Amino acid sequence: MTTEATGTREATRASSATRTSSGQGAVSGQAIARSLEAILMVADEPQSLVSLATAVGAPTAAVRQAVESLVADFDGADGGTRRGFELREVGGGWRFYVRPEFDPVVRDFVLTQNPSRLSQAALETLAVIAYKQPITRSSIAQIRAVNVDSVVRTLLGRGLITESATDSETGAITYETTELLLTHLGLNSLDELPLISPLLSDGQEGFDDVA
């Protein structure tokens, strides 16, 4: 075999390898974006790029690019459909949010479709937030000694609490009660809440460990 033929064959192999590598990169980028979409769909707190990169096992730069592509996709870039939700950066992390213009219809839907009374767990969590606000989800969980993720989502959906700010040290979202709660309780302000100390058990009969 001549030197020229050998060189041609090697060049062909290199070109093929380059095309394969490029194709794998494109697929990998799509896979990262879809994985991030799935993770963010169930995340209760904003997720940092580092935590997302760890979750999907990809470089932070690739995750950042994938997040930016998702933001553009949901915003209807390049003639696409603008979604009713958006991927927003809050407190150094990323999370899905309903677009502000759809807040009223979502609130009406939740209140109409879920008219049932709050569970004991929801009432206890609501009381903690009312008396300790603004308070983070982790602090609520520490006070109640149980996981409160689903309960907080329920209270948010009912419009009884809202995300108020972001903790400057931890980046965690803090929660506080809304005017709707005051309306339900017939109060003008939180100052009219009864003192909690007379309502607390002295612990002589033990405490229920109820989620």
Image (spheres, grey):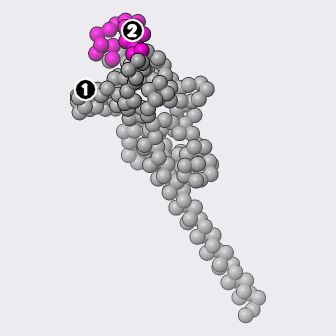
Q: Position of residue 96 (x, y in %)?
A: 44, 38
Mark sitting earlier along the chain (1/2): 1
Residue nearer the viewer, 17 or 146: 146
81 relative position to 12: left or right: left
Q: Quarter holding the N terminus?
A: bottom right
Asked if 182 appears above or below 83 in the picture, the reply is above
On-image quarter of the C terminus: top left
Residue at position x 32%, y 8% from top?
A: 187
Figure quadrant of residue 10: bottom right
Q: Which residue is mark 1?
A: 117
Q: Quadrant of residue 149?
A: top left
Q: Percent x, y for residue 28? A: 54, 59
Question: Which portion, as a residue range, is magenta?
Answer: 181-202
Q: Give the image location of residue 50, x and y in percent.
A: 60, 43
Relative to 17, residue 83 above or below: above
Magenta residue check for 99: no
Quarter of the image holding residue 122? top left
10 Å crowding of disc 1: few (<14), some (14-19), many (20+):
few
Residue matched to label 2: 198
The disc labelled 2 sits on which kind of residue?
A: Pro
Which numbered tag is attached to residue 61?
Answer: none
Answer with left or right where residue 114 lies relative to residue 33.
left
The crowding category of the residue bearing disc 2, from other C-alpha atoms within 10 Å (few below 14, some 14 to 19, many at least 20), is few
The residue at the point 28 percent across, 31 percent down is 110
Question: Could you say whether the residue bearing mark 2 is in a helix, strand or loop?
Answer: helix
Q: Can residue 163 be seen?
A: no
Disc 1 versus disc 2: nearer the observer: 2
Query: Between residues 97 and 101, which one lies in front from this camera angle?
Result: 97
- Check residue 185 for magenta coloring: yes
Which residue lies most toward the front here?
204
